[in-house]
Amino acid sequence: MIEYKREKMMDELKKYISQFIQTESNKTSMITVTNIDLSKDLKKARFFVTVFPENEEVAALDFLERNQKNAKEYLKEKSKLSRIPFVTFHLDNGEKSRQHLDEISRSL
């Protein structure tokens, strides 16, 4: 039961953070939420993102870090969650590595 609640919460968080990024970003890059790491006590949510084009990663991460508080306020406003976790953003290096491996395997 607890794992189901956690999964449902993660789905809702991902949905609304994605909407927040879509509405608030300046559209110079495509920022995609690829994964969420939600703490066991549900108080911290780490959002992993990928950015295209890659040369905009620093600017996109800077934008997300500056807007952490606004993202949390957006979650409070839009979601039905009773407790909103502390929000942080990180680049998803695992996804980048997977894409690189795909490129290598295609070239072989």
Image (spheres, rainbow, N blue to C red):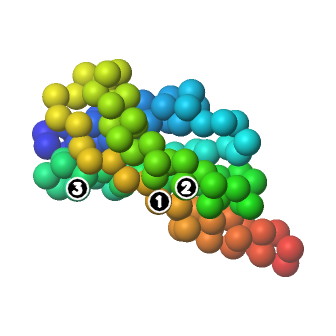
- Amino acid beneath label 2: Leu
> Of all residues shown, which one is farthest toward the right?
107
Task: Verify CB contact (< 8 Å) between mark 1 and mark 3.
Answer: no
Residue 55 visible from this viewpoint: yes
Q: Give the mark, 1 or 3, whose residue is nearer the N terminus.
A: 3
Q: Is mark 1 on a helix, strand or loop?
A: strand
According to the picture, the residue beneath numbered tag 2 turns out to be 61
Disc 3 crowd rating (10 Å Cα; few below 14, some 14-19, many 20+) is: few
Q: Quadrant of residue 16?
A: top left
**Element under label 3?**
loop
Q: Residue at x 62, y 71 (%)?
A: 97
Left or right, 34 with respect to 27, comes to left
Q: What residue type is labelled 3?
A: Ser
Q: Do the residues labelled 3 and 2 touch (CB within 8 Å)?
A: no
Residue placed under numbered mark 3 in the picture: 39
Q: Where is residue 14 in the image (x, y as percent from the top left)?
A: 42, 38
**Compared to 16, does 90 lie above or below?**
below
Q: Residue 39 location in percent, x, y?
A: 22, 55
Of 24 and 51, the residue lying toward us: 24
Quadrant (top left/top right/bottom left/bottom right) for the N terminus: top left
Q: Earlier in the sequence, mark 2 or mark 1?
A: 2
Sort mark 2 into few (<14), some (14-19) or many (20+) by Cα contacts within 10 Å: some
* Residue at the spot of label 1: 90
Task: Name which of mark 3 and mark 2 comes first in the sequence.
Answer: 3
